[in-house]
Image: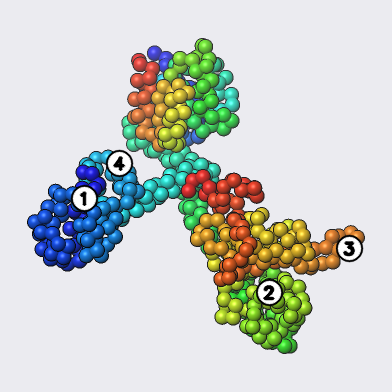
Amino acid sequence: MDRKVLLIEDEPNIIEAISFILSRDGWEVKTHSNGHDAMDAVRARRPDLVILDVMLPGKSGFDILQEIRADADLGATPVLMLTARGQIKDRELAEKSGVSRYMTKPFANADVLEAVRSMVGS
Amino acid sequence: MPESSMIGTRIRERRVMNGIRQSELANMVGISPSYLNLIEHNRRRIAGKTLIKLAEVLEVEPSALSEGAEVTLIAALREAAGSQNGIRVETERVQEFAGRFSGWANLLARLHARVEGLERTVETLTDRLAHDPHLAASLHEVISSVTAIRSTSSILVETEALEPEWQARFHRNIDEDSRRLAEGAEALVRYLEGAASSEADIKSPQDELQAFLARSGFHFPTLEEDRTGAFEITAIIDAATELGTEAARRLARDTLKQYRADARVLPIGPFLSEVRRDPSPERLARVFCCGLPLIFRRLAALPDSEVGLIGLVVCDMSGALIFRRPFPGFVMPRDAAACALWPLFQVLGQPHAPVRALLRQAGRGQETVLALAATEQTAPATFDQPALLRAHMLILPEPKARMEDPVRDVGASCRICPLRDCRARREPSIVADGF
């Protein structure tokens, strides 16, 4: 069961930690660390799930989310959004853009695992 | 309970307050005690002669008994009652409450209004904090490193039989991130401390000069004497702890040289005796046959005990404020450019036409002040260079005698100015919308 996750995040040590726990959980993890060509990475990898940071260099996570949702092919991909700000406005914006789940930093590893498992529905 | 039926309650309150027994009061107005008792318990309506008689004996206006608490108070109380979910407020008895405990009711209404005002302020401040880019950047840094540390450390603790290479790598990551966290936290603290105390810090040479002048009371007795020179100026500057930088000492030297030059033209003896006769700057300029700016500077160099409240602000042709003797209640901005509506800037446009105006600065206590503005040439014109001017504006308390002049609404500086629809506004205010 090769479940593919694409992690779009710009903090190297967060990338490393999330990659580690997801790989141990049996996921195939690909990473991408900037905003402007994130959409190309999504197209190329065709993941089962995208973990998307809000604050990315080049383009915001909200814009990328909207592009994913607007794409005929990839529009249904589950997206878990990570943000450093737990503000209501951010959450509203994410929901409006069609986020599947939303998580604020700092998070517990167990919560991330629980979220990705339930989103892909193994 | 309708308002009019509470008359009895108010009569009773008033009678008890005045220390009169029910039977006594009944006697004095010529009704039976039992009837008064019924009135006081709102079981009988009263009006007309009896009401007037009662009011007279109780030493209140009849309307105070018949109308009771104001309508606005009732409305405010209703609003206060509606603002709190979860407390059952006896709104049906609001009239009775306002009538019987008018002091408490007014206090409650006022506190409610205050709470509402403060809530709005907090909202505005929170909003501003949320949109502060420096703060957002520092916070993002802190949260990112906390997130990495949190996630990495739980991997180290929770993963059984973690390979040594991974272990070493995650340890290194935690070390890196904790260092970042420390820096981020420090930056945050520095930023917050800076924000809190920025008003008190002495920053520019201008500020040092200002602190020095303020401590000296804008008056230098040694420079008022006959034969003073560079020696006295140097002595004053050397003794001034406020002047930390060379630039500030230079500014102070220029200011004191001007002071001494002014004192030579207008020695304090004759000047003071004329000021004591009549301090009108226009008259003084005529008596001493000199320009208004010199008179302004000499007035602003007198000790408080002689001139009372007096403020002076001087700007150069760029509009930069280069001298400020503060006037309580009239804000002269320190860093930002001042309000373009000040007569100070008006006289730069017509240098030979001094301006007198009553000013009311928006915000604060809204005290009206009298402003007198005039310019002085500091360097003559040549064919290559235009003349250099300095504008002076003297600030005095509002004259007791009524002036015909209309009061001009001005600000201190746009960013902190609440004036709406201002023709002179050059940047949005941080107070106009929120507060």
Q: Mark 2 lies on which chain?
A: B
Q: Crowding near pointer 3: few (<14 within 10 Å), some, many (20+)?
A: few
Q: What amino acid is found at the position of numbered circle 3 in the picture? A: Thr
Q: Which chain carries label 3?
A: B
Residue that sits furthest to the right in the current view: B383
Q: What amino acid is found at the position of numbered circle 2 in the picture? A: Pro
Identify the disc placed on residue B284.
none
Q: Which of marks 1 and 3 is in front?
A: 1
Q: Distance between the residues labelled 1 and 4?
A: 23 Å
Identify the disc placed on residue B82.
4
> Which residue is drawn at the image coordinates 24% and 63% (left, top)?
B56
Say yes or no: labels 2 and 4 on the same chain.
yes
Q: Quadrant of residue B102?
A: bottom left
Q: Distance between the residues labelled 1 and 3?
A: 85 Å
Q: Mark 1 points at which residue?
A: B6
> Which residue is drawn at the image coordinates 53% and 63% (left, top)?
B367
Q: Are marks 1 and 2 in contact (CB under 8 Å)?
A: no
